[in-house]
Amino acid sequence: MLMVLHPEAHRTSFAFEAILRCLQQYHLRYTLHPQTTHLELVLQGDFPPIETLATLPGVIRITPIPSPYRLLATTNSSSGFTYQGVSFSQHDFHCMIGLCAVDTPVHVEAVMQRLQQLGQTCTRMGAYKPRTSPYTFQGHGRSCLPYIFELAGKYGIRVIAMEVMDASHIDEINEALAITGSSTGVMLQIGTRNCQNYSLLQAVGSQTKFPVLLKRGFGISLHESLMAAEYIAHAGNPNIVFCLRGIKSLAAAPHRNLADFAQVPLVKRLTRMPVCVDPSHAIGVGDVGIEGISDIHHAAAQGVIAGANLLLVDCHPHPAHAWVDGHQALTLEGLVPFLEDMALVRTTYLKRCTLLGQGA
Ligand code: PEP
Ligand code: MN
C-alpha cells in the first residue's frame, strides 16, 4: 500500500512521528519515497482496517500500489506459509542441502543422517532429472521415491525439495508418500528449464497439498520469471518460494551461470514470496578462492547477506563418484563449516537490518 502524506507532515513533524509510531504498533514495514511536494511511504505487512491509518493526522490517502503481480505482490496478504510445521516466509531462514540426483539408498541415508545430526529438517533430493544429454543419467524417477520418503521419516526430515517435470510426477510422489506413511513432505521444484512450461505451472498450481519452489528461467527477464510464479498462484496455490539460480551468460565462464543474488531484496520488495538462492547451480564448480573459501561458499554468502530465506545446496558423500553435478557438491565433512559460515552471515544480515533498515 502507498501512504501519501500532507506537505505539512514533513519528516520532523509531530504528525510524522505519530504516524511512524502507529506503523510500528502494527508491525508495518515502510520505505520512504521523498517527493517534492509531499512524502510517500510504501507500507508492507499485515494491515489493520485502512481507516485506522487513513484517519491519522497528516495522511492524505492510502492506495493499493498497482502491481503486475496481482496475487503475489507484497501488499496482498501476509508473507509466507507453514508446511510440515516449518515456516517459510521472508523472515525465516532454512537450508535445503542434499543430493542433486539420488543415486543409491546408502547415499540418501548418509546425507539424511548427517543432516539430522546437524539439526536440519529440510533437504533436496533429485529423482527426476532434466539433463542436457539424453545419454546421461535421467534420475531413478518413481522407483527411488519409497526409500527417499522412508529414510526422510527415519531421520526427521520434514520437507524435501524435489523437481517435477510432468504433472504425472506429482501423482507418483503422492502415491509413494501414501504407501510410506506420509512421514515427510515434498516441496515441488520447477527447474529453470521449465519456468515457462505453463501447463506444468498450472499442474503444480492447481493443487495445494505441496508448496512449490520455482526457479527463475535462466535466459528470461526477472519479470517473466515472476509472472511464471503468478501463474502458479493464479491456478490456486499461493505457497511459492522463488529461487534465484543465476542466468546463462558467456560472461559467467568459467562459472556455470552468472549469479543474480543482488536481486534477492528486489524480489522480496516486489512480491511476498520467500526467496531462495542456489549457489551450487549458479557457480557449478568447486574452485577455491585465494583465502581458501570456495566460490560456492562466497556465492551462498552473497545471497544470505542480501536477505535470502532459503539456500538450495548440492552435497554428496563422495562427490567424485556422483552421477550428476559432483563437481559442485559439498562433502559431508564440509557441511559443518558451511552451516557455521551461513549462520555467521545470517547473523550479520540481521545486524545490517537493525543498523541500516527497520529490522528483518
Ligand atoms: C537442480 O536444482 O537440480 C537443477 C537442475 O537446477 P536448475 O533447474 O536451476 O538448473
Ligand atoms: Mn544439478
Image: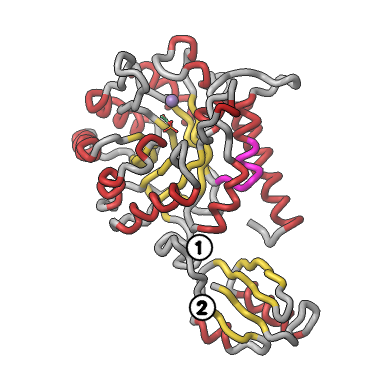
> Within 10 Å of the Cα at label 2, are there few (<14), some (14-19), or many (20+) other Cα atoms?
few
Outermost residue to the top: 321
Vertical arrangement, residue 271 with respect to residue 284, above or below: below
Q: Is residue 106 left or right of residue 142?
A: right
Q: For mark 2, what is the residue? A: 48
Q: Is mark 1 within 8 Å of ligand 1?
A: no
Give percent across and percent down for residue 219: 47, 37
Q: For mark 1, what is the residue? A: 74
Q: Is residue 131 left or right of residue 246?
A: left
Is 57 in front, or is 350? Answer: 57
Q: Are marks 2 and 1 in contact (CB under 8 Å)?
A: no
- Dot 2 lies on which element? loop
Q: What residue is shown at x 54% (from left), y 52% (from top)?
A: 267
- Dot 1 lies on which element? loop
Which quarter of the figure has residue 305?
A: top right
Is 115 in front, or is 136? Answer: 136
Q: What residue is shown at x 26% (from left), y 40% (from top)?
A: 182
Quadrant of picture, ligand 2: top left
Q: What residue is shown at x 49% (from left), y 58% (from top)?
A: 272
Quarter of the image where the N terminus is located: bottom right
> Within 10 Å of the Cα at label 1, are there few (<14), some (14-19), or many (20+) other Cα atoms?
many
Q: Mark 2, mark 1: which one is toward the viewer? A: 1
Which quarter of the figure has residue 340?
A: top right
Q: Type of residue at label 2?
A: Pro
Point out the stretch of residues depicted in magenta.
Answer: 301-308
Give percent across and percent down for residue 310: 52, 42
For residue 87, the mark is: none
Vertical arrangement, residue 308 with respect to residue 146, above or below: below
